């Protein structure tokens, strides 16, 4: 797939997300309104701009990934829009913020390289595990940052900013990004050792176990934490493949 095909796929995926919003409006007897146009513009600006950033700062990146991200984001947005129009409006802002953050990250990595991620991969792993543990903070203690149990699982934390205003978020979502960075850095540093076949079990070939232990330990610890928190319904941490 060429970059022009990538951009065409992004436009198509944005149009499909907009079409989904239109269908929801028709189901509500609302018809085509301003929400439809805003949705298309937001997706086009966010991901079209991100596509240009990829072409500028990561020209060797696979052109298949970004259209898939747009399609998945569109499906998620349609789900939110069908449930709550107001929250869907907030979600559009998050799409723009996320695309801008991704563009800034691409610029930083292109100017400084990925060596900083490789150098601090173990620190990134530690921070990711601590983020997964944050929801286990006591709910009733006196600090502004508190764990929150909902539906029998502990996935949320609340940060009190003053008065009655507080912000809730799931630190596991940030932890997943950190785990992806750790796995990518580890695989990049050990790709030659992992490719070489050292052991065979029947028809299957495996690298040396010591090369796999850090990956399995990081992934296994993350899954154990989610089980401990009663969050089996949450998406599991990414496994390097």
Image (cartoon, rainbow, N blue to C red):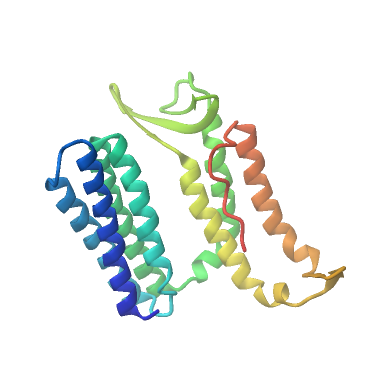
Quadrant of the image containing the N terminus: bottom left
Label tally:
0
Q: Position of residue 206 (x, y in %)?
A: 78, 69
Residue 91, above or below 204: above
Q: Position of residue 203 (x, y in %)?
A: 83, 70
Seen from the viewer's position, the closer of residues 72 and 212 is 72
For this orientation, the residue located farthest to the top is: 140
Q: Residue at x 67, y 72 (%)?
A: 190
Seen from the viewer's position, the closer of residues 101 and 74 is 74
Residue 152, above or below 61: above
Q: Position of residue 186 (x, y in %)?
A: 62, 65
Residue 25, above or below 97: above
Q: Position of residue 63 (x, y in %)?
A: 40, 74
For this orientation, the residue located farthest to the right is: 202
Quadrant of the image containing the C terminus: bottom right
Q: In this rendering, does residue 50 appear at all?
A: no
Q: Is residue 40 left or right of residue 209?
A: left
Q: Residue at x 53, y 30 (%)?
A: 154
Q: Is residue 53 left or right of residue 42?
A: right
Q: In this rendering, does residue 150 appear at all?
A: yes
Q: Residue at x 71, y 76 (%)?
A: 195
Q: Is residue 208 left or right of residue 46?
A: right
Q: Residue at x 18, y 57 (%)?
A: 41
Seen from the viewer's position, the closer of residues 233 and 33 is 33
């Amino acid at each position: 797939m060429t970059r022009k095909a990538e951009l065409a796929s992004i436009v198509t995926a944005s149009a499909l997300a907009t079409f989904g919003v239109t269908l929801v409006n028709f189901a509500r007897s609302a018809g085509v309104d301003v929400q439809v146009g805003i949705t298309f513009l937001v997706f086009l600006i966010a991901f079209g701009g991100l596509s240009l950033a990829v072409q500028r700062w990561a020209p060797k990146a696979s052109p298949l990934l970004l259209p898939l991200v747009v399609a998945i984001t569109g499906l998620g947005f349609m789900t939110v829009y069908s449930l709550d129009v107001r929250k869907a409006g907030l979600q559009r802002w998050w799409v723009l913020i996320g695309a801008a953050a991704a563009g800034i990250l691409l610029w930083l990595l292109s100017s400084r390289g990925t060596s900083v991620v490789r150098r601090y991969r173990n620190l990134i792993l530690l921070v990711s595990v601590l983020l997964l543990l944050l929801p286990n903070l006591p709910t009733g203690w006196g600090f502004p940052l508190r764990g929150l149990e909902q539906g029998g699982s502990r996935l949320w934390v609340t940060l009190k900013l003053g008065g009655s205003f507080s912000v809730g978020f799931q630190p596991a979502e940030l932890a997943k990004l950190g785990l992806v960075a750790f796995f990518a850095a580890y695989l990049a540093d050990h790709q030659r050792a992992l490719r070489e076949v050292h052991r065979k079990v029947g028809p299957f070939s495996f690298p040396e176990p010591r090369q796999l232990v850090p990956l399995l330990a990081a992934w296994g610890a993350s899954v154990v934490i989610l089980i401990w928190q009663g969050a089996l319904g949450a998406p599991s941490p990414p496994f390097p493949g």
